[in-house]
Image (cartoon, rainbow, N blue to C red):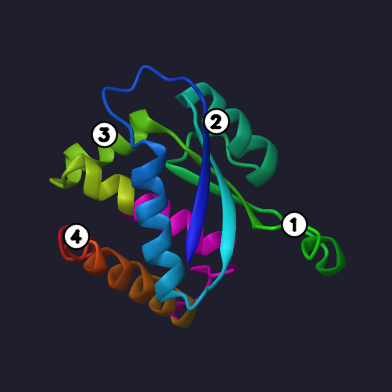
C-alpha cells in the first residue's frame, strides 16, 4: 500500500507527527486491513475549540475528541477517475492526544500512531458499535502497531 497524507492545521502542540510518519503508520494499518493500491488521507490537527465544534456539528456531542474520522464516500463511478483512492479525513486534537498519552503512561509517538490507525480503520468502515466489531477493530489496531514495534495499547491502559 502506498498512502499519501495531506496534513493541515496549525496548533501550538509540543510535538505532532509529520507526513512521512503518518504515511508509515497508515500504510501499516492498510496492510493489516488487506487494503492494496494507492490512497490519499487528509489529516487535520485542530485545537480543542475546533474539535468541540466539529464533534458537536457531526456527532451531536459538545466535547472535544481525540480523533474523528470522515469517510470520503466517493461514488464508485467517480473513484475510478482518480489515480489515488480518496479515503477521507481524520481530525486529531494534539492537546488531547498529549494529555491521554501522559495520563495513560504511553509514549506520545505511540499514542499518536494508535489514534491515527484507529481513525484510518474508521475510514475503512470498521467500528466499535458491538463487541464483535470492537474485537475485530482492536485486533487490526494491535497488529498494525506490532508491525511498527509498538506494544499493544490496550494492555497499558
Q: Nearer the viewer, residue 54 or 43?
A: 43
Q: Residue under circle 2?
A: 52
Q: Main secondary structure of the magenta part?
A: helix
Q: Residue under circle 1?
A: 82
Tell which circle, 4 or 1, labels the residue nearer the N-terminal end: 1
Question: In the current view of this chain or complex, which residue is farthest to the top?
Answer: 12
Residue 102 location in percent, x, y? 18, 37
Span of residues in magenta? 114-131
| Alpha carbon separation for disc pair 4 and 3 | 19 Å
What's the mark number on residue 8?
none
Q: Residue under circle 4?
A: 150
| Alpha carbon separation for disc pair 1 and 3 | 38 Å
Q: Do the residues under discs 3 and 2 have CB atoms within 8 angstroms?
A: no
Crowding around mark 2 (Cα neighbors within 10 Å: few <14, some 14 to 19, many 20+) is some
Judged left or right of residue 62, residue 1 is left
Q: Nearer the viewer, mark 1 or mark 3?
A: 1
Q: Is residue 8 magenta?
A: no
Residue at figure coordinates x 50%, y 56% from the top left: 3
Crowding around mark 4 (Cα neighbors within 10 Å: few <14, some 14 to 19, many 20+) is some
Judged left or right of residue 22, residue 108 is left
SS for dot 4: loop
Residue 150 location in percent, x, y? 19, 60
Judged left or right of residue 115, residue 14 is left
Residue at figure coordinates x 46%, y 25% from the top left: 48
SS for dot 2: helix
Vertical placement of 7 versus 132: above or below?
above
Crowding around mark 1 (Cα neighbors within 10 Å: few <14, some 14 to 19, many 20+) is few
Q: Do the residues under discs 1 and 2 have CB atoms within 8 angstroms?
A: no
Q: Nearer the viewer, mark 4 or mark 3?
A: 4
Vertical placement of 133 versus 16: above or below?
below
Q: Quadrant of residue 138?
A: bottom left
Q: Residue under circle 3?
A: 99
Amino acid at each position: 500500500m502506498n498512502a499519501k497524507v495531506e496534513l493541515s492545521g496549525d496548533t501550538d502542540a509540543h510535538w505532532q507527527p509529520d507526513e512521512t510518519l503518518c504515511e508509515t503508520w497508515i500504510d501499516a494499518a492498510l496492510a493489516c486491513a488487506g487494503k492494496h493500491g494507492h490512497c490519499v488521507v487528509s489529516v487535520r490537527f485542530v485545537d480543542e475549540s475546533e474539535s468541540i465544534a466539529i464533534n458537536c456539528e457531526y456527532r451531536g456531542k459538545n466535547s472535544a475528541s481525540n480523533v474523528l474520522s470522515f469517510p470520503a464516500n466517493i461514488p464508485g463511478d467517480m473513484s475510478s477517475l482518480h489515480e489515488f483512492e480518496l479515503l477521507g479525513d481524520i481530525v486529531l486534537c494534539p492537546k488531547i492526544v498529549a494529555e491521554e498519552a501522559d495520563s495513560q503512561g504511553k509514549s506520545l509517538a505511540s499514542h499518536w500512531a494508535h489514534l491515527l490507525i484507529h481513525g484510518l480503520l474508521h475510514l475503512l468502515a470498521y467500528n466499535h458499535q458491538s463487541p464483535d466489531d470492537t474485537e475485530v477493530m482492536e485486533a487490526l489496531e494491535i497488529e498494525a502497531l506490532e508491525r511498527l514495534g509498538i506494544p499493544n495499547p490496550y494492555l497499558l491502559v
